[in-house]
Image (tube, grey):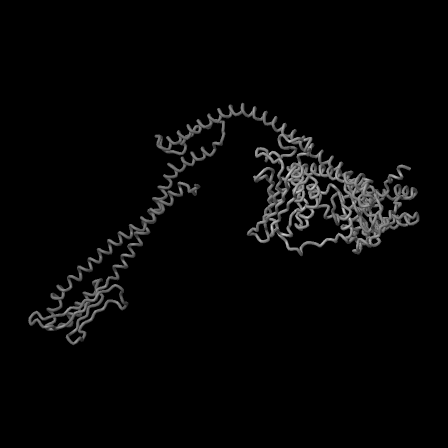
Amino acid sequence: MNRKYIALEKKFMIILGVFSTLVCILIPIILTFLSFNYENVKVDRLIAKIPTAIEKNVITHMEPFEKEYFERFFRAAINVRELKEIKLSDLKGNILVDELKGNEPDQYIQYFHYELKSPKTGKLIGYLDITITRDHIYQEVMAEFLKIFIAMVFWSLFLTVIVWVAFKILIINPLNHMNDYIKALKPGQTELPKPLTLRQFRYFKHQDQLDIVADAVYAAARGAIELNIEQRDRYKIIEVEVIKRTEEVIEEKQNADKANEEKTEFISHISHEIRNPIHAISGFVNILEKEVNDPNEKELIIPLKAATANLLGLVNDLLDISKAELGKLRIEPKIVDTKKAIKNMKMMFELKIKEKGLDFIFDVDPDFPRFIKTDGLRTAQIMQNLLTNAVKFTEHGYIKVSLKSQKLPIQNKETITILVEDSGIGVPKGEREKIFEKYRQMAGQSYEKYQGSGLGLAISRKIAKLLNGELQIIDKKGPGTCFELILKEIEVVESQEVVTPIEDDEDIQFFDAKVLVVDDEKLNRDLVMWNLRPYKLKLYFAENGKEALNKALINKPDIILMDLLMPKMDGIESIELIKVYENLKDIPIIVISAIIGPENEEKLKELADGLMRKPVLQKDLVKELAKYLPHKIISKKETVKEDTVVVLPSDSSIPPQLEKLLRDTYLPKIKDLKDTMSIDEIESFAKKVKELADENKCKTISTWCENMLTQTRNFNVGEIEKSFDNFGDLLEPTPEKKAS
């Protein structure tokens, strides 16, 4: 427990001050009290003598009454300081003689009434009233108290100073010196200290207790430092070994981490490279499935579609495990229609399960919520992995899915429990945790029979944790396995919060619109073209961001579909340049890429109007286009079947003579214009270049000039600088010109 620190000299001063104060108060009080009692005793003695004086000096002169005597006697008697008033009266109360000292009333007085009797006859002959005052006693006592108090104060101050100086010299200064000496000692100090001596603070040659304590402190300090020196020498030997071993361990760990990161990055990159053509193949297979009507030909498409889906699933698993290791696996909560999700899951596995002769049971709690907010795709991914394993490892019996919910005290929150149970080969208790490790399969499992990458359950458990849930194997009666997925604090929403999708028997018909498709892969461009064949759209294509900018300037599309990773100029840079132009900045841009992730999603949301991750299904692409292009909802029976997509190539080239003139004469002027930023000179420059562009019928340069003139009128300096930077890019030879 930490106690508040108060210096010893302060404590001593407090004690000395309290003692001096008590002395200054108590001694004057005691002395004054004794004096007061003494004076009071003197007054009491005077009062005791009054009857004797009356008999001797008063009664003897009453018969006969001698007035002159009494007046003379009373005047003499009143000079006694204790007497305030003497009054003599007859039997009728008439005052015969009255002597009063002063006119001011006293505070502390006593009245005495005496009856005067004749010594001869014994009869009452008069009355004598005497007033005794004690005011002088109190006044003298108070004056005496003040004198004594003042004297004691001066004496106490003098004594306090003397005692304090002596205490400071004899005790405090040596103690402070010892304290400073101890504070100067550092933890782990290896330099021997100087001897601790108190002689320069003392005025006595002989040692006392403080000197003994100082010697003990010095001895303890010296012993501790000698021990530090010994430990230092010992630790130096150990430290050299530890540093050497630590460096080896760090180097090994860094090499292992680097190798693991390189492996993860390689898997991620190679998976992306593999996934791009798989996306295209999958897209074309889906299109082919719709186009082919012959049953025999459709049978050939089914295994092709299944193989593509399996390959894509494996690549996605590799990507997910790579993202999980790099910390990039993310969750996107959205409103999920559980009834529809259950229906889709049934349809996905029902045929496979029936083909194996198994019973497929769905047990849904009657109170299970219809609409919840979670990542439906990731939850479905876990379910697919669990059901795929159940189908793979079950030869006889059943597969059962149970869905339960439990309401929580938190408003609109429930705990969702999903059980996937089968009657297959089961998992021994010792293997239950191991099978959740990546690339691990159950001991003794035949790869030839069951195959598998060993990634599904590892990814599923990681996703479950990201969903604020748990995935584990629990005990069940009989043979088989039971996986339990618990999702905690899932938000339950009302049905009206879910956007109603387009019905299956409805389709979209676009009005005339121009779409610019930007992708460096011809397969991906062709896939978009085939997906949009049934719709009335005009398509333009560009292989990189620079070509996309030129074609956007010439054709001004209604919407742009932009890839990210492209040569010469990537998608992000192209979008930023497109947004510079006044006549292009309002065109909606949808980014379609397989590399949309947490590291770039926020920036992409600021730049683009929509984000779509590859692979993109035809229906999803059409729905996204419908957000920005004019259209109407029609019945699928009314859909036009013939090809209505129009692909219009455009020439974005610049005539050679104009390009040479601009490069040699006008391009060098841009540096000076950027330095001065004179709006008048920039406007004049743009007008001259526009005249040349119009003479040579070059729409690309003419559009650039119109945009520059608009920016000068708006004094938009930032956009002017970007347009200047883009001028040189427009003059760079296109691939077609280089080839020629």
The C terminus sits in image quarter: top right
Relative horizontal placement of residue 173, taking residue 641 as reference (left or right): left
Q: Who is closer to the viewer here, 340 or 217?
A: 340
Q: Residue 389: in sight, yes or no?
A: yes
Is residue 35 placed above or below 225 in the rendered structure? Answer: below
Relative horizontal placement of residue 618, taking residue 143 as reference (left or right): right
**Residue 320 picture location, percent across and down:** 68, 39
Relative horizontal placement of residue 595, taking residue 199 as reference (left or right): right
**Residue 355 picture location, percent across and down:** 70, 40
Q: Residue 672: in sight, yes or no?
A: no
Q: Residue at x 19, y 58 (%)?
A: 42
**Residue 32 picture location, percent across and down:** 27, 54
Question: Which corner quadrant of the image does residue 61 belong to?
Answer: bottom left
Q: Who is closer to the viewer here, 187 or 654?
A: 654
Q: Residue at x 69, y 47 (%)?
A: 344
**Residue 5 picture location, percent across and down:** 43, 42
Question: Which corner quadrant of the image does residue 549 belong to?
Answer: top right
Q: Residue at x 42, y 36 (%)?
A: 176
Is residue 179 placed above or below 504 in the rendered structure? Answer: above
Question: Which corner quadrant of the image does residue 734 belong to?
Answer: top right
